[in-house]
């Protein structure tokens, strides 16, 4: 192991000599964290809404006002019939049509059921679904206000359900609180995976790999020497990310930082092992980048960062058992938001330890085949 410090020092010198690489290592993840945290927001606002008001009463105007004052809907036009409004929907000038029936006010006053129609552009099904849910909330609130204010006949009591919700771990349902830990996990993964995947290839293209192969460095020392610098960089990037999350988004770690960093330490070994393994089986930096990108895109989409893992098909759930990013995103949210302890993430820790051992051993065996 005497050669190990020399290899680590050599790697740091190579990184420090690259004037472009150093700013990228630390500046790029921070910029991405800030931009993605603000941009990757699934909350839908400014839903363009066309109105077809066939009632034209004070009650119908109040319903429209209830929509526009909610902050989610923007009225883009009023039409006398549904056909004209549908033309605007087809041109994508509006996202939704609110059709108010002719006898809205009369039916409500006589306690008769009223059918209010919503027509939504579902090309973007997520936006349509969220807009529909918002609309239901607005209509329910309108109905509740009206029942509260109207004078009912003696003996008639409006039915009402008192629903009180309490949200744990993200009490304000702040989307950034949900997304920032996951985005941080993805950025650390991408940075370390790409850097390690092109490392040995770069040595081979520069011709320095032959010089290292003739030295008495063992394969274990060689692989370990390649991993340690990027492992340290990954730790530093995570630390910067946590500081940015606190300063900009007021997101702190509810659990133990020691637990979070203990898992990160094992996770980085696994990810760097994947990168080094790819680097040993490819012949050019372009091949290494493409293969790394191929696996990262699959792992990222299945990780649960953007969509719930429970909603993916069964075959995808099976693949997800081998997805290290999924475990890291889960642990980040568990520790940072829920305050989970080491016992709570012990399963994730054991699985990640298995990944780390598997990929490091595979990288060492693959390196011996290609360079030995």
Image (tube, grey):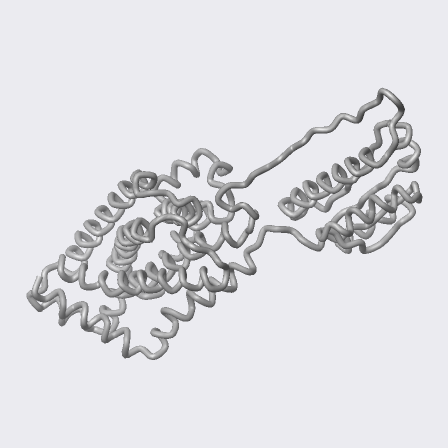
Identify the residue shown where x is 37% and y is 43%.
340
369 lies left or right of 263: left
Identify the residue shown where x is 18% and y is 71%.
9
Near-viewer residue (144 or 197): 144
Please tell me in which quadrant of the rendered image residue 239 appears: bottom left
Identify the residue shown where x is 29% and y is 41%.
351
- Count of numbered marks: 0
* The N terminus lies in quadrant: bottom left
Asked if residue 198 is positioned above or below residue 57 in the image, the reply reads below
* The C terminus lies in quadrant: bottom left
Near-viewer residue (325 or 56): 56
Near-viewer residue (200 or 52): 52
Horizontal and vertical percent position of residue 102: 92, 37
Do we see residue 233 in this rendering? yes
179 lies left or right of 101: left
Horizontal and vertical percent position of residue 32: 47, 64
Near-viewer residue (162 or 271): 162
Asked if residue 107 is positioned above or below residue 342 in the image, the reply reads above
194 lies left or right of 176: left
Horizontal and vertical percent position of residue 344: 34, 39
Horizontal and vertical percent position of residue 283: 28, 63
Do we see residue 267 in this rendering? no
């Amino acid at each position: 192991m005497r050669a190990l410090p020399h290899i680590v020092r050599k790697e740091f010198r190579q990184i420090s000599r690259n004037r472009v690489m150093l700013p990228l290592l630390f500046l790029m993840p921070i910029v991405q964290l800030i931009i993605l945290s603000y941009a990757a927001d699934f909350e839908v606002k400014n839903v363009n809404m066309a109105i077809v008001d066939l009632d034209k009463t004070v009650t119908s105007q109040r319903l429209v006002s209830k929509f526009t004052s909610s902050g989610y809907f923007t009225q883009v036009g009023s039409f006398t019939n549904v056909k004209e409004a549908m033309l605007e929907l087809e041109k994508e000038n509006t996202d939704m049509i609110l059709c108010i029936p002719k006898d809205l006010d009369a039916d409500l006053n006589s306690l008769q059921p009223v059918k209010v129609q919503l027509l939504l552009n579902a090309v973007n099904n997520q936006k349509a679904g969220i807009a529909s849910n918002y609309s239901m909330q607005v209509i329910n609130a309108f109905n509740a206000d009206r029942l509260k204010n109207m004078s009912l006949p003696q003996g008639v009591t409006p039915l009402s359900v008192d629903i009180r919700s309490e949200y744990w771990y993200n009490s304000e349902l702040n989307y950034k609180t949900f997304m920032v830990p996951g985005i941080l996990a993805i950025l650390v993964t991408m940075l370390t995976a790409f850097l390690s995947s092109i490392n040995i290839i770069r040595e081979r293209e520069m011709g320095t790999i032959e010089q290292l192969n003739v030295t008495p460095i063992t394969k274990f020392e060689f692989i370990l020497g390649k991993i340690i610098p990027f492992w340290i960089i990954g730790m530093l990037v995570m630390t910067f990310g946590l500081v940015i999350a606190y300063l900009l988004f007021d997101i702190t770690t509810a659990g133990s930082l020691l637990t979070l960093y203990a898992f990160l330490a094992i996770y980085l070994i696994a990810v760097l092992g994947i990168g080094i393994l790819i680097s040993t089986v490819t012949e050019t930096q372009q091949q290494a980048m493409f293969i790394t990108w191929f696996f990262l895109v699959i792992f990222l989409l299945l990780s649960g960062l953007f969509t719930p893992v429970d909603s993916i098909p069964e075959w995808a759930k099976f693949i997800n058992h081998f997805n290290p990013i999924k475990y890291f995103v889960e642990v980040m949210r568990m520790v940072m938001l829920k305050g989970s302890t080491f016992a709570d993430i012990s399963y994730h820790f054991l699985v990640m330890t298995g990944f780390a051992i598997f990929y490091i051993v595979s990288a060492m065996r693959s390196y011996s085949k290609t360079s030995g």
